[in-house]
Amino acid sequence: MAHKSKILIIGGTGCIGKYIVEESAKAGHPTFALVRENTASNPEKSKLIESFKSFGVTLLHGDIYHHESLLKAIKKVDVVISAVGSQQIADQVKIIAAIKEAGNIKRFIPSEFGTDVDRVNAVEPAAHFFRVKASIRRSIEAEGVPYTYLVSNGFAGYFLPNFGHADATAPPRDKVVIIGDGNPKAIFVKEEDIATYTIKAVDDPRTLNKILYLRPPANILSFNEIVSLWEKKIGKTLEKIYVQEDQLLKKIQESPIPLNLLLSISHSAFVKGDSTNFEIKASFGVEASELYPEVKYTTVDEYLDQVSQPSSSAMSKQRRSGYEPSDTETEGYESSWFETNHENGVLVSEGLKNVMPRNTSPMIMRLNINRGHHSSRFGYEVSSPANGSKVSPA
């Protein structure tokens, strides 16, 4: 039996971290989770913490801001995986420094789990956010720390169950807002599959000092293609509202933080196609489904089958309650007015949620937050003579 590396997960109670902790333990790796003492005693996290213990995970109390506890934890393992939230991305330099001092780590996977930050065409403020992630890559390389960068692209669980609509438990059945023309290809991967590929990479020499891209072929779809799949499942054609790029860019410029960040990330994914608009070259990357064909990943088509079932509503609510998202991911964004999801998710005004139509896509609400009325669209629309769908005027 091949040697299984000892793995430390930092940020293991977060939205992707918990899946990585579970997969690491189930794959037979001696697994350690660094948790703050107040997190371990948090009633909302207790169920998750108990599940970790049932899998044989060793809990270590510590914090990336407490060098001694961080260093002590790192010295116990072979591999460090960071799944810290967006507010701690820049502070991963503290993890890098501890890894360098410890001198025993054979692989570090920093918290990325999104787009390839070295190959994006994002506008501000997303461009700055991606530069911060890229700066962590440069720090890792400068210190000579062995690494794997994990480019997971979109989280299926934050988009497919409701097409990003925070107040719905199923994809839309009446109307859907589509960013741009809906043709650029995006990628959505189920969180459990992201964790599976992540753990498979830790002892694989083919992924050492490389970018591991998750591009499962069946999950490379445009927004239009995803909507079409859904329409076939429900036997109904949805009303489509297309958001022109120039209108989206204008809204990004006008919107406050953090709405402008979320809109600019959506622009990167759905207008620029930043997940798929470049070729993976052997000099810098490898593709997960090619390396690990034995992994039976969940396809977008299969996922939509699941969320179309009546029982999926309860499952969706359960996935979004209690210990999700990470406490570190919501720092700086918590308020009674905004609800914030994953970077490919949704930010909506609580004041608008109760008056907006249910079962519609989130971009309607995103783009109306600063309006002085509660229109369900952009104020007015024009019909497209080509296909009868509606477009928002620039």
Image: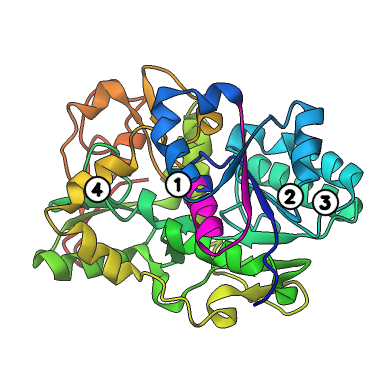
Q: Nearer the viewer, mark 1 or mark 2?
A: 1
Task: Give the residue number, with chain letter if any, for mark 2.
Answer: 134
145 or 186, which is in the foreground?
A: 145
Q: Is residue 325 above or below residue 19?
A: above
Task: Give the residue number, with chain letter if any, for mark 1.
Answer: 54
Task: Give the residue number, with chain letter if any, for mark 3.
Answer: 140
As helix, strand or loop, the secondary structure at mark 4 comes to: helix
User: x, y percentage for residue 305?
Assistant: 21, 66
What range of the chain is rendered magenta?
18-36
As helix, strand or loop, the secondary structure at mark 1 comes to: helix
Outermost residue, left side: 235
Q: Is residue 25 magenta?
A: yes
Task: Give the residue number, with chain letter if any, for mark 4.
Answer: 315
Which residue is found at the position 34% from the left and 39% from the top? 320
Q: Nearer the viewer, mark 3 or mark 4?
A: 4
Quarter-of-image position of residue 386: bottom left
Amino acid type at mark 2? Ala
Query: CA–CA distance between discs 4 and 1?
Result: 22 Å
Amino acid type at mark 3? Ile
Amino acid type at mark 4? Met
**Circle 4/circle 2 CB separation < 8 Å:** no
As helix, strand or loop, the secondary structure at mark 3 comes to: helix
Query: CA–CA distance between discs 1 and 3?
Result: 34 Å
Quarter-of-image position of residue 168: top left
Left or right, 306 with respect to 16, comes to left
Which residue is found at the position 77% from the left and 40% from the top? 95
